[in-house]
Image (cartoon, rainbow, N blue to C red):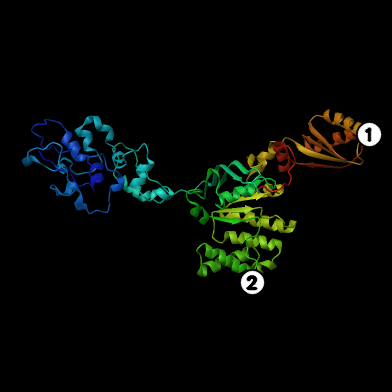
């Protein structure tokens, strides 16, 4: 008999929800073969992907609602022509779609595994990504967050297998920054100079709402790492996400989500403090009363309200750095990069800046802080990565890193510089004391790693007296990040020339 197939547009609706099959007429010459029914349900070329489904079509387009669809609407003749008097639309063989049962499962038992409606709506569930991208184009750009509702509509019918449909929900990213194996190499200043590899495979993760410190001397690669994560320079290798956005695929989304305070001030010296904030806001698309309120809020927060009308060139070093931080916060970023924010500040201005930075995390801001001040990283950062020659040497919380160094550091200042014989005699006596570790001599200073801290001082004083020397002063200190650096790098923390 001659059969016609239903219109292609509503095909996913008819296939994805059909509980029962009414017995239909069989072809005179085909016996009980279910092949025509299988052809009626499945268009040539396989199941259509969900991208062709049009949920906004009127209900009248459903083949089940119209027992005699127009044969001119995408209909194709069957491979075997049967008597026309027994021709009947395939819609009659698929009655009252309710629960998403595939009629092919009853027509051909060997196809039972295809009864899951989602598998037909998305033809290749193993690959997954391509199928979902066709079904819901909105997911292609920025992941499943914005496309959650269309996916829910595609799998809205109950699943007879008891498995709940997959629905994507918007979730805040756990990692504000997630970087893997970042590499950056610069050409030499002259053609004959070899290339300089500033960053050699840095991997780090910054948890949202925390301060992460990159600690290292000048030239370690801290600033280059920040420039890559802030989209100011492209990495040669590696990958990263910032505020949930891919660094390489969606750099504009990254820029909308970050603020940056560079090493050197970015404020216009010939504009007032307020004008600098307003200019930065306009670059981010802000304006009007909202931007004016934001500028006033930041000027007041950083103690610059009284100097708002003064040119930035008249600001002191501390005021200028506070203005730089305010500029970085105008757009209310999710991630803030602070590249050595206290360099060049006096101790008082540095303490004020530290207090301001600590207050920022109370607002849920995520901060990547680079510094070559050990005490700054120890005080501000919840986690620290020590960088040397473009690589992460060690990472952890400051307390975790310092706890790896057992005991306290004791420094004895002698009244006179000992000669070689006295140094050897004192070394032997100190080594014989329980709880005394490595001992070093520098001029009149004697340093030792000890267990017990101040409790062992009397024994140390006795050892000095026994070596024919006298003690002028003594200090006991807990392990510092400088001690951590010494252990992992092999030398004391120092300043070197920037390589990038």
Q: Which residue is mark 1?
A: 468
Q: Position of residue 264 (x, y in %)?
A: 66, 57
Extreme-right residue of the structure: 468
**What residue is shown at x 51% (from left), y 53% (from top)?**
254
Residue 14 image point, x, y percent:
22, 44
Residue 158: x and y in percent read 29, 42
**Closer to us: mark 1 or mark 2?**
2
Q: Position of residue 258 (x, y in %)?
A: 55, 55
162 left or right of 327?
left
Identify the secondary structure beneath mark 1: loop
Gap between marks 1 and 2, in whole Å? 68 Å
Residue 99 visible in the current orientation: no
How many residues crowd around disc 2 within 10 Å: few (fewer than 14), some, or many (20 or more)?
A: few
Residue projecting furthest to the left: 85
Q: Identify the image quadrant of the N terminus.
A: top left
Q: Which residue occupies the extreme front position in the image? A: 192
**The quarter of the displayed image where residue 427 is located:** top right
Q: Which mark is residue 309?
A: 2
Task: Tell me if 177 is positioned left or right of 54 in this view.
Answer: right
Q: On screen, 271 above or below 481?
A: below
Local crowd at mark 1 within 10 Å, few (<14), some, or many (≥20)?
A: few
Is the C-beta separation of discs 1 and 2 under 8 Å? no
Give SS at disc 2. loop
Residue 376 in view here = yes
Kindly identify the residue that appears in the image at 7 percent across and 40 percent down. 86
Above or below, 443 against 304 in this view is above
């Amino acid at each position: 008999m001659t059969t016609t197939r239903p219109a292609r547009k509503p095909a996913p609706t008819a296939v994805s929800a059909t509980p029962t099959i009414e017995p239909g007429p069989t072809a005179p010459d085909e016996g009980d073969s279910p092949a025509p029914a299988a052809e009626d349900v499945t268009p040539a070329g396989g199941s259509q992907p969900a991208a062709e489904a049009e949920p906004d079509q009127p209900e009248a387009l459903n083949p089940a609602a119209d027992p005699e669809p127009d044969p001119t609407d995408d209909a194709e003749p069957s491979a075997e022509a049967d008597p026309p008097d027994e021709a009947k639309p395939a819609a009659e063989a698929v009655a009252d779609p309710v629960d998403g049962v595939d009629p092919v499962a009853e027509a051909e038992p060997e196809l039972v595994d295809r009864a899951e409606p989602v598998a037909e709506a998305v033809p290749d569930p193993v690959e997954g990504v391509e199928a979902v991208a066709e079904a819901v184009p909105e997911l292609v750009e920025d992941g499943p967050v914005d496309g959650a509702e269309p996916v829910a509509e595609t799998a809205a019918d109950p699943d007879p297998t008891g498995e709940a449909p997959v629905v994507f929900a918007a979730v805040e990213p756990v990692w504000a920054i997630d970087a893997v194996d970042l590499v950056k190499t610069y050409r030499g200043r002259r053609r004959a100079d070899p290339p300089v590899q500033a960053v050699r495979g840095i991997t780090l993760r910054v948890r949202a709402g925390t301060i992460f410190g990159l600690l290292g001397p000048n030239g370690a690669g801290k600033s280059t790492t920040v420039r890559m994560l802030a989209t100011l320079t492209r990495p040669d290798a590696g990958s990263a996400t910032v505020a949930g956005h891919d660094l390489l695929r969606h750099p504009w989304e990254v820029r909308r989500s970050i603020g940056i305070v560079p090493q050197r001030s970015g404020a216009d010296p010939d504009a007032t403090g307020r004008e600098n904030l307003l200019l930065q806001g306009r670059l981010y698309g802000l304006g009007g009363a909202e931007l004016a309120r934001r500028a006033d809020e930041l000027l007041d927060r950083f103690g610059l309200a009284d100097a708002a009308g003064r040119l930035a060139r008249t600001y002191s070093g501390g005021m200028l750095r506070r203005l730089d931080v305010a500029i970085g916060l105008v757009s209310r970023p999710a991630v803030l990069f602070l590249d050595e924010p206290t360099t060049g500040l006096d101790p008082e201005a540095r303490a004020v800046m530290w207090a301001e930075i600590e207050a920022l995390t109370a607002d849920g801001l995520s901060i990547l802080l680079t510094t070559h001040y050990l005490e700054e990283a120890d005080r501000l950062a919840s986690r620290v990565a020590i960088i040397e020659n473009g690589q992460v040497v060690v990472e952890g919380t400051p307390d975790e890193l310092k706890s790896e160094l057992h005991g306290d550091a004791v420094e004895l200042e002698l009244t006179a510089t000992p000669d070689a014989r006295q140094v050897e005699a004192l070394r032997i006596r100190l080594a014989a004391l329980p709880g005394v570790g490595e001992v070093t001599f520098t001029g009149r200073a004697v340093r030792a790693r000890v267990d017990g801290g101040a409790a062992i001082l009397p024994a140390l004083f006795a050892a000095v007296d026994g070596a024919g020397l006298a003690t002028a002063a003594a200090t006991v200190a807990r392990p510092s990040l400088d001690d951590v650096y010494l252990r992992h790098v092999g030398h004391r923390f120092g300043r070197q020339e920037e390589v990038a």
